[in-house]
Image: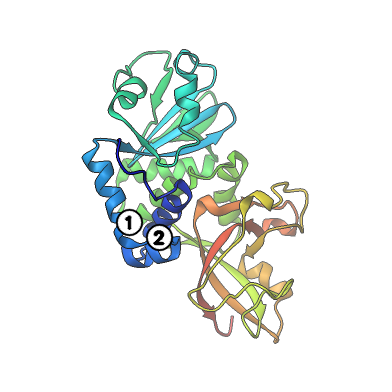
Amino acid sequence: MSGKSYKVTTDILAKYNQYIEQGLSKAEACRRAGIAPTTMSDHIKRLAAAKVYPYAIMKRAGILSIVMGENFYNISSDSILFEKNKILIMSLLNRDTYALTQPEYDILIGPVDYSAPIKEFTAINEGPISKDGKYYYKDVEVSPDLYEILLDAYKNKKKSIKSIIKFADMLVQNPDKDVIRQLYSFMRHNDITIDPDGYVIAYKAVNMNYRDHRTGKFDNSIGSIVQEDRAIMDTNPNNTCSRGLHVGSQSYIHKYYSVESRLLACLVHPKDFVCVPTDYNGGKARVCEYKVLKEVVNP
């Protein structure tokens, strides 16, 4: 991996991948990420030529999750693997380019025995499992009701509920374990649905100029992507009206909806839910990003 340094930072690469996941063209994803298409193309070619393994990484209490394509791998901070390779593993969080070299891949992934009873480094189980009274999907704890519908989806392979599998795949990317456990129950309790690609369809009331009621600074025109830094948002569900972008069920929105408001349907990636406040009968949520899908006329 010697030679010219990469111009694509991890932040730019993360934004590019996010826009690609949203269905944008490569050219448009590059434009929004602030990188020239030729630079991004050269970056991808360099990775391929260098025989490296691109990855994404998530950090939560005591565990680092490495994501490579559709495969997730966990490293526990109290494992022998972590102790032996702490410097290497922690360096994965602070790289200009998120990619493993062949020797790094061999150390962290290649030699692992996934059948060992005590797994220092484990491939995540693909389907839903139940263990010790708790329910898991891809080794992440989920709610009992989500577990049941996922189990039905995997057993019966129903095409009609493929969307719930896509939803769950995206939900386990959420960095907040409480949101992962609560979100599906919140949705079932309300009139909130999932689109065929697994995105959550929620609702929002804005003023007649498509601006948010509270600050008036967020443009909610049809097709807009509205986002705010997750790090500055309030994750405490007991703080019921606090910092964050708010969406909710139609029944919740109707309580505050007026003739001087527009009702919008919005698409929210499950990983972008930040908090489900405890009041309002569980009818609203704080998120860090959503896309305005359409205006709901005569709700």
Q: Could you tell me residue 253's position as x and y percent?
A: 67, 71
As shown in the figure, which amino acid type bears the numbered disc 2? Ile
At horizontal 27% and vertical 52% (from top left) the residue drawn is 42
Q: Is residue 262 above or below residue 193?
A: below
Q: Is residue 255 above or below residue 164?
A: below
Q: Nearer the viewer, residue 270 or 66?
A: 66
Image spot of residue 177 (x, y percent): 58, 39
Reading the image, the residue beneath label 1 is: 39
Residue carrying label 2: 35
Instruction: State the colouring used for the structure image.
Output: rainbow
Choose between 119 and 37: the one closer to the eye: 37
x, y percent for residue 195 = 43, 62
Q: Residue at x 66, y 52 (%)?
A: 276
Q: Quick one: SS at disc 2?
A: loop
Tally the numbered discs. 2
Where residue 258 appears, as percent x and y from the top left, is 71, 82
Residue 25 visible? The answer is no
Q: Quadrant of the N terminus?
A: top left
Q: Is residue 64 above or below residue 237?
A: above
Look at the numbered discs 2 and 1 and tell me whether their residues touch, using CB distance below 8 Å. yes
Please state, as top left, top right, bottom left or bottom right, where the C terminus lies in the image.
bottom right
Q: Residue at x 48, y 42 (%)?
A: 172
Residue at image point 68% right, 58% down = 244
